[in-house]
Image: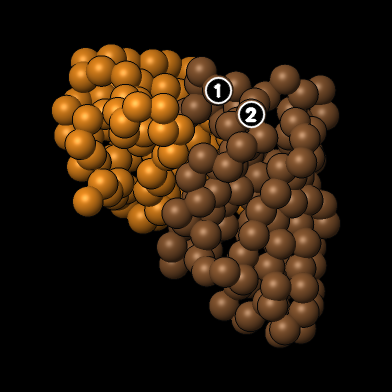
Chain colours: A orange, B brown
Amino acid sequence: EDQVTQSPEALRLQEGESSSLNCSYTVSGLRGLFWYRQDPGKGPEFLFTLYSAGEEKEKERLKATLTKKESFLHITAPKPEDSATYLCAVQRDAGNNRKLIWGLGTSLAVNP
Amino acid sequence: DAGVIQSPRHEVTEMGQEVTLRCKPISGHNSLFWYRQTMMRGLELLIYFNNNVPIDDSGMPEDRFSAKMPNASFSTLKIQPSEPRDSAVYFCASTVGGAPGTQYFGPGTRLLVL
Protein backbone atom coordinates (compact mmCIF):
# COMPACT_ATOMS: atom_id res chain seq x y z
CA GLU A 1 0.00 0.00 0.00
CA ASP A 2 1.27 3.47 -0.88
CA GLN A 3 2.24 5.37 2.24
CA VAL A 4 3.90 8.62 3.31
CA THR A 5 5.31 8.99 6.83
CA GLN A 6 6.65 12.26 8.20
CA SER A 7 8.84 12.71 11.25
CA PRO A 8 9.00 14.16 13.75
CA GLU A 9 5.35 15.01 14.34
CA ALA A 10 6.39 18.23 16.05
CA LEU A 11 9.65 20.13 16.31
CA ARG A 12 10.56 23.16 18.37
CA LEU A 13 13.68 25.12 17.45
CA GLN A 14 15.38 28.25 18.64
CA GLU A 15 15.85 30.97 16.06
CA GLY A 16 19.01 30.18 14.12
CA GLU A 17 19.05 26.49 15.11
CA SER A 18 19.20 24.47 11.89
CA SER A 19 17.44 21.10 11.55
CA SER A 20 15.82 18.69 9.11
CA LEU A 21 12.36 17.24 8.61
CA ASN A 22 11.94 13.77 7.18
CA CYS A 23 9.44 12.32 4.72
CA SER A 24 9.73 8.60 4.02
CA TYR A 25 7.57 6.99 1.36
CA THR A 26 6.62 3.65 -0.07
CA VAL A 27 5.05 3.88 -3.49
CA SER A 28 5.08 1.68 -6.54
CA GLY A 29 6.83 4.02 -8.91
CA LEU A 30 7.38 7.64 -7.94
CA ARG A 31 6.33 10.32 -10.36
CA GLY A 32 7.02 13.22 -8.02
CA LEU A 33 7.41 14.27 -4.38
CA PHE A 34 6.03 17.59 -3.19
CA TRP A 35 6.55 19.77 -0.14
CA TYR A 36 3.90 22.18 1.08
CA ARG A 37 3.70 24.65 3.95
CA GLN A 38 0.47 25.17 5.89
CA ASP A 39 -0.12 28.09 8.24
CA PRO A 40 -2.87 27.86 10.89
CA GLY A 41 -6.31 28.48 9.45
CA LYS A 42 -5.08 28.44 5.85
CA GLY A 43 -4.77 26.01 2.99
CA PRO A 44 -1.45 24.36 2.13
CA GLU A 45 0.95 26.37 -0.01
CA PHE A 46 3.23 24.70 -2.54
CA LEU A 47 6.98 24.84 -1.90
CA PHE A 48 8.92 22.29 -3.99
CA THR A 49 8.68 19.46 -6.49
CA LEU A 50 11.33 16.71 -6.64
CA TYR A 51 11.29 14.08 -9.38
CA SER A 52 14.37 11.89 -9.05
CA ALA A 53 16.87 10.68 -6.47
CA GLY A 54 19.71 13.14 -5.99
CA GLU A 55 17.64 16.15 -6.92
CA GLU A 56 17.75 19.22 -4.68
CA LYS A 57 15.66 22.40 -4.59
CA GLU A 58 16.25 25.56 -2.54
CA LYS A 59 14.16 28.51 -1.49
CA GLU A 60 15.46 31.02 1.01
CA ARG A 61 16.27 29.05 4.20
CA LEU A 62 14.72 25.83 2.92
CA LYS A 63 16.38 23.05 0.94
CA ALA A 64 14.63 19.86 -0.13
CA THR A 65 16.48 16.69 -1.10
CA LEU A 66 15.32 13.32 -2.41
CA THR A 67 16.58 9.75 -2.20
CA LYS A 68 14.91 6.54 -3.37
CA LYS A 69 13.22 6.06 0.00
CA GLU A 70 12.87 9.48 1.58
CA SER A 71 13.07 13.23 1.32
CA PHE A 72 14.49 15.77 3.71
CA LEU A 73 13.52 19.38 4.20
CA HIS A 74 16.52 21.16 5.64
CA ILE A 75 15.90 24.43 7.43
CA THR A 76 18.99 26.60 7.84
CA ALA A 77 19.05 29.32 10.51
CA PRO A 78 15.25 29.36 10.86
CA LYS A 79 13.29 32.45 11.83
CA PRO A 80 9.99 32.65 13.75
CA GLU A 81 8.15 33.24 10.46
CA ASP A 82 9.16 29.74 9.37
CA SER A 83 6.80 28.36 12.01
CA ALA A 84 4.15 26.28 10.21
CA THR A 85 3.15 22.73 9.44
CA TYR A 86 5.17 21.21 6.61
CA LEU A 87 3.42 18.59 4.51
CA CYS A 88 4.91 16.05 2.15
CA ALA A 89 2.99 14.35 -0.66
CA VAL A 90 3.84 11.87 -3.41
CA GLN A 91 2.33 11.12 -6.77
CA ARG A 92 2.47 7.55 -8.01
CA ASP A 93 3.51 6.86 -11.54
CA ALA A 94 0.16 5.56 -12.77
CA GLY A 95 -0.97 6.83 -16.12
CA ASN A 96 -3.02 9.99 -15.94
CA ASN A 97 -3.81 9.71 -12.25
CA ARG A 98 -3.29 13.09 -10.59
CA LYS A 99 -3.96 11.83 -7.06
CA LEU A 100 -1.47 12.79 -4.34
CA ILE A 101 -0.83 10.73 -1.20
CA TRP A 102 -0.20 12.98 1.80
CA GLY A 103 1.73 12.63 5.03
CA LEU A 104 0.34 13.95 8.31
CA GLY A 105 2.89 16.74 8.48
CA THR A 106 5.51 18.10 10.84
CA SER A 107 4.49 21.03 13.02
CA LEU A 108 7.47 23.37 13.33
CA ALA A 109 7.70 26.10 15.96
CA VAL A 110 10.65 28.51 15.90
CA ASN A 111 11.14 30.51 19.05
CA PRO A 112 12.72 33.99 18.89
CA ASP B 1 -6.06 36.55 -9.70
CA ALA B 2 -8.02 36.12 -6.47
CA GLY B 3 -6.91 32.52 -5.99
CA VAL B 4 -9.23 29.64 -5.19
CA ILE B 5 -12.42 30.89 -3.56
CA GLN B 6 -14.42 28.80 -1.14
CA SER B 7 -17.70 29.48 0.62
CA PRO B 8 -18.84 29.46 3.28
CA ARG B 9 -15.70 29.81 5.41
CA HIS B 10 -17.47 28.41 8.45
CA GLU B 11 -20.55 26.26 8.72
CA VAL B 12 -22.30 25.02 11.85
CA THR B 13 -25.22 22.70 11.33
CA GLU B 14 -27.20 20.02 13.08
CA MET B 15 -27.00 16.34 12.38
CA GLY B 16 -29.27 15.34 9.52
CA GLN B 17 -29.15 18.67 7.72
CA GLU B 18 -27.89 19.12 4.18
CA VAL B 19 -24.60 20.96 3.75
CA THR B 20 -23.34 22.45 0.47
CA LEU B 21 -19.79 23.68 0.09
CA ARG B 22 -18.78 25.78 -2.90
CA CYS B 23 -15.57 26.34 -4.79
CA LYS B 24 -14.40 28.60 -7.58
CA PRO B 25 -11.03 27.46 -9.01
CA ILE B 26 -8.37 29.70 -10.47
CA SER B 27 -9.24 30.74 -14.00
CA GLY B 28 -7.47 28.55 -16.54
CA HIS B 29 -6.94 25.63 -14.18
CA ASN B 30 -8.53 22.44 -15.50
CA SER B 31 -8.11 20.12 -12.52
CA LEU B 32 -10.04 20.53 -9.28
CA PHE B 33 -9.65 18.58 -6.05
CA TRP B 34 -11.80 18.31 -2.92
CA TYR B 35 -10.00 17.37 0.31
CA ARG B 36 -11.00 16.81 3.92
CA GLN B 37 -8.51 17.53 6.70
CA THR B 38 -8.66 16.27 10.28
CA MET B 39 -6.04 15.99 12.99
CA MET B 40 -6.24 12.20 13.01
CA ARG B 41 -6.24 11.46 9.30
CA GLY B 42 -4.57 14.53 7.80
CA LEU B 43 -5.46 15.53 4.24
CA GLU B 44 -7.68 13.05 2.47
CA LEU B 45 -8.58 13.36 -1.19
CA LEU B 46 -12.32 12.98 -1.63
CA ILE B 47 -12.68 13.46 -5.38
CA TYR B 48 -10.99 15.18 -8.26
CA PHE B 49 -12.18 16.49 -11.60
CA ASN B 50 -10.30 16.98 -14.83
CA ASN B 51 -11.93 19.22 -17.43
CA ASN B 52 -15.14 19.14 -15.34
CA VAL B 53 -15.31 15.33 -15.43
CA PRO B 54 -14.99 13.32 -12.18
CA ILE B 55 -11.88 11.12 -12.51
CA ASP B 56 -11.37 9.54 -9.10
CA ASP B 57 -14.07 9.52 -6.41
CA SER B 58 -12.67 6.59 -4.46
CA GLY B 59 -12.14 8.84 -1.44
CA MET B 60 -15.78 9.83 -1.10
CA PRO B 61 -16.73 8.29 2.26
CA GLU B 62 -20.20 7.06 1.36
CA ASP B 63 -23.35 7.87 -0.57
CA ARG B 64 -24.07 10.82 1.70
CA PHE B 65 -21.33 12.72 -0.14
CA SER B 66 -21.71 13.98 -3.69
CA ALA B 67 -19.78 16.45 -5.83
CA LYS B 68 -20.51 18.24 -9.05
CA MET B 69 -18.66 20.49 -11.43
CA PRO B 70 -21.20 21.95 -13.87
CA ASN B 71 -18.64 24.24 -15.53
CA ALA B 72 -14.97 25.18 -15.39
CA SER B 73 -15.48 27.90 -12.79
CA PHE B 74 -17.67 26.25 -10.17
CA SER B 75 -17.88 23.09 -8.09
CA THR B 76 -19.97 21.94 -5.13
CA LEU B 77 -19.54 19.29 -2.47
CA LYS B 78 -22.76 18.21 -0.82
CA ILE B 79 -23.30 16.19 2.33
CA GLN B 80 -26.80 14.86 2.89
CA PRO B 81 -27.59 13.97 5.61
CA SER B 82 -24.69 15.35 7.65
CA GLU B 83 -23.30 13.53 10.70
CA PRO B 84 -21.04 14.69 13.56
CA ARG B 85 -18.14 12.61 12.16
CA ASP B 86 -18.21 14.81 9.05
CA SER B 87 -16.86 17.70 11.12
CA ALA B 88 -13.57 18.73 9.51
CA VAL B 89 -11.97 21.38 7.33
CA TYR B 90 -12.82 20.92 3.66
CA PHE B 91 -10.40 22.28 1.10
CA CYS B 92 -10.76 22.83 -2.59
CA ALA B 93 -7.62 23.01 -4.75
CA SER B 94 -7.00 23.57 -8.43
CA THR B 95 -4.13 23.14 -10.83
CA VAL B 96 -3.21 22.99 -14.46
CA GLY B 97 -3.50 19.41 -15.63
CA GLY B 98 0.14 19.05 -16.57
CA ALA B 99 1.37 19.86 -13.06
CA PRO B 100 -0.85 17.90 -10.65
CA GLY B 101 1.55 18.27 -7.76
CA THR B 102 1.46 22.05 -7.85
CA GLN B 103 -1.96 22.54 -6.36
CA TYR B 104 -3.36 25.88 -5.26
CA PHE B 105 -5.56 25.56 -2.21
CA GLY B 106 -8.47 27.67 -1.11
CA PRO B 107 -8.81 28.91 2.48
CA GLY B 108 -11.06 25.99 3.41
CA THR B 109 -14.51 25.58 4.93
CA ARG B 110 -14.55 24.68 8.61
CA LEU B 111 -17.59 22.43 9.12
CA LEU B 112 -19.02 21.56 12.51
CA VAL B 113 -21.94 19.15 12.68
CA LEU B 114 -23.64 19.08 16.06
Mark 2 residue element: loop
Q: Is residue A42 above or below residue B113?
A: above
Q: Is residue A71 left or right of residue B53?
A: left
Label 1 is placed on what type of residue? Gly
Q: Nearer the viewer, residue A39 or B64?
A: B64
Which residue lies under the disc numbered 2?
B51
Query: Mark number for residue B62?
Result: none
Which residue lies under the disc numbered 1?
B97
Report the quarter where the C terminus of chain B lies: bottom right
**Residue A83 position in % (x across, y down):** 54, 43
Badge count: 2
Question: What's the distance in space between the residues labelled 2 and 1, CA to CA?
Answer: 9 Å
**Residue A81 position in % (x across, y down):** 60, 37
Label 2 is placed on what type of residue? Asn
Q: Mark 2 or 1 closer to N-term?
A: 2
The residue depicted at 64 percent of the width and 29 percent of the height is B51
The residue depicted at 66 percent of the width and 45 percent of the height is B92
Mark 1 residue element: loop
Query: What is the crowding at mark 1: few (fewer than 14 residues within 10 Å), some, or many (at least 20)?
Result: some
The residue depicted at 69 percent of the width and 56 percent of the height is B77
Q: Do the residues labelled 2 and 1 touch (CB within 8 Å)?
A: yes
**Residue B13 position in % (x across, y down):** 78, 77
